[in-house]
Image: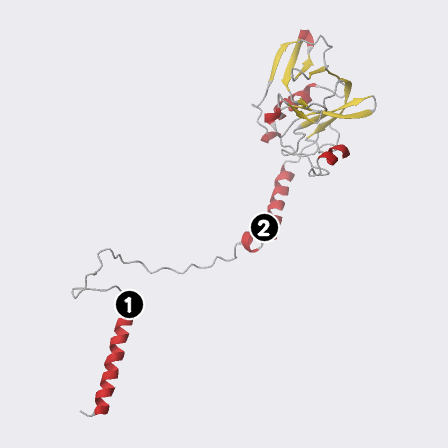
Amino acid sequence: MSLRLRLVLGVAALLANASAATAQYYFWPESTQNGATADPDYEAQPRRQRARANWPFDEERRDAPRARARENHERDDRDRERLAALPPDADPNYSTPIDYDDDVDMRQTRRRFIGDPTAEEPGTLTIDTRARRLYLSLEDGKAVEYAIGVGRTGFAWKGEAKIGRKAFWPGWTPPPEMLERRPDLPEHMDGGLRNPLGARALYLFQGQKDTLFRIHGTNEPESIGRAVSSGCIRMLNADVIDLYKRVAKGARVVVR
């Protein structure tokens, strides 16, 4: 056999061996002559399927502004479904015509019927800031007692006033002096569960002048029984809804 032929056959043998080794390395484990797997821990794995792209692509990740706009639109649709006719005594300029009452836990209440400790005329609201209780005088010497939150030191207010305005899920506009103390607050917030005025608000007037003090609900039920507010009287939302139904505009309010 000539030298050239031997070289050609040798190169062909080397290529064949290399191809077999490559195929064994990439496509199957080392095997015995009987075909059994040499590695006892080896388990045949199914071929991994390449993930197919969903279509259309996930808009919340690919187009966050559009997803947020859709979420806002859906929330607006829910609010439109809950549009409510305002109570006839609610001031429309201070009320929100959306009914969130179904989201209020009416079992979360701190009111009870007792003998009237105030000796006031029926229909009068008496606020005892020290006891942190509000009393609505009824007929026959009875009263409804509500637990309240009151103004902290330096913000407490005492005197007499009348309910000059009533609001249903009131909007909140912090007064300028509050915005000076708390520049992080919004200039205005529409009524709703996150609004600090809660479900209802009764605005206290002296004559025709707004005292800027209110009896209102709260989004912080843990503050009831404490002195934490900026002078206003806080009530649980279930309790302020109840009180709103019982008192009329013009009712006398005594703060002690």
Mark linked to residue 36: none
- Residue 135: percent from the left, percent from the top? 67, 15
* Closer to the camera in the image, 223 or 117: 223
Dot 2 amino acid type: Ala
CA separation in Å, label 1 and label 2:
48 Å
Dot 1 amino acid type: Tyr
- Locate residue 13 relative to residue 85 in the image: left or right: left
Find residue 221 and report its image quarter.
top right
Q: Which residue is mark 2?
A: 67
Q: Which residue is mark 1?
A: 25
- Residue 63: percent from the left, percent from the top? 58, 55
Find residue 94 and report its image quarter.
top right
Q: Is residue 187 above or below residue 101?
A: below
- Residue with the most extreme bottom position: 2
* Closer to the camera in the image, 136 or 87: 136
Could you tell me which residue is drawn at 74 percent across and 25 percent down?
A: 213
Q: Is residue 163 above or below residue 73?
A: above
Q: Is residue 3 above or below residue 17?
A: below
Could you tell me which residue is drawn at 55 percent across and 51 percent down?
A: 60
Picture quarter with the C terminus: top right
